[in-house]
Each structure stands twice: as structure tokens, then as C-alpha cells.
Amino acid sequence: MTSTSVYHRILRISAVVVAFVLVFESGLISETTAQLSQTTELYLANAVGMSASVEPTELNQMTAQLTAQKTLLDQREAALREREINIEFGSGGTDYSTYVLASVLFILLVLILLNYTLDYFRYRDQMTLQTN
């Protein structure tokens, strides 16, 4: 019963790693880590984008003016969206990643407990067979 399989080692290591990530994500030690995590998630969510520009000529002067107005409106919309996001996070918006990590950690802990329980019963059965 003293030997451990690779599966047991991986399970224990993954439980410890998920616990550390959960502590980092939830901000239990420092609120800065939770803000860093949320900011990183927002950055990754907004990182995908595309833009195109056309050099103004005499023929498309009107198009260039419309593009400039659209760019200005997009900047205002982005500023509004940023304010809404800050208000949502400032008012205690739901952080689902913490719940997901907590669920994964709970599942890992249940698996570890189940493994050790089954190992105990197997060891006990082997001992009773040896004594008979």
C-alpha cells in the first residue's frame, strides 16, 4: 500500500495546481490577482479583431469622411463599453471562472478520496485472503 501509481501522483498534483489557480483566480490572498485575472480574460476576449483603411483620394473623399465619423463613433462605443464593464466588475459581477475552478477542484478531491477508499478495501481484502 506504500507504492503509488502514476495515476495517483498525477491526480494529487493536478488537485494542488487547481487549488493554487483557484486561490489566484478568486483573489483570496490579494485582490490584485483577481483583477489581473479578470483583466487578462477581457484582453483575450477582445484581442481578436480586424481593421482596414483606405487612403483618401479625390474620388473617395466622401468615403474617407464617413470612415472618420465611423471611427469616432466606434471609439465612443468602446469607451462606453469599457465603462459598462468597469461598472459591472465594480458592482460584484459574477465571476464564473472561480465557480468552474472550484467545481474541478471538488471533483479532483472526490476522485482522490475514492481512490484511497478503494485502495484500502483492496488491501483489506488481500490481507484477509492471505490470513485464510
Image (cartoon, rainbow, N blue to C red):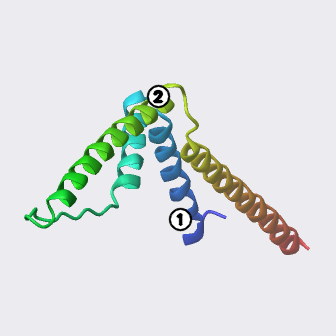
Q: Earlier in the sequence, mark 2 or mark 1?
A: 1
**Along the line of sight, the residue nearer the viewer: 65 or 124:** 65
Q: Position of residue 34 (x, y in %)?
A: 43, 36
Q: Residue at x 41, y 42 (%)?
A: 37
Q: Tag 2's secondary structure? A: helix
17 over 128 or under it: above or below: above
Q: Position of residue 130 (x, y in %)?
A: 83, 74
94 over 130 or under it: above or below: above
| Circle 2 residue | 87
Q: Residue at x 55, y 33 (%)?
A: 93
Q: Position of residue 80 (x, y in %)?
A: 39, 35
Q: Position of residue 118 (x, y in %)?
A: 78, 64
Residue 10, numbered label: 1
Residue 33, numbered label: none
Which numbered mark, 2 or 1, is in the foreground of this view? Answer: 2
Identify the amino acid type marked 2.
Ile
The C terminus lies in quadrant: bottom right
Residue neighbourhood size for the residue with mark 1, other residues' Cα within 10 Å, grouped as few (<14), some (14–19), many (≥20): few
The N terminus lies in quadrant: bottom right
29 over 121 or under it: above or below: above
Q: Residue furthest left?
A: 58
Identify the amino acid type marked 1.
Ile
Q: Tag 1's secondary structure? A: helix
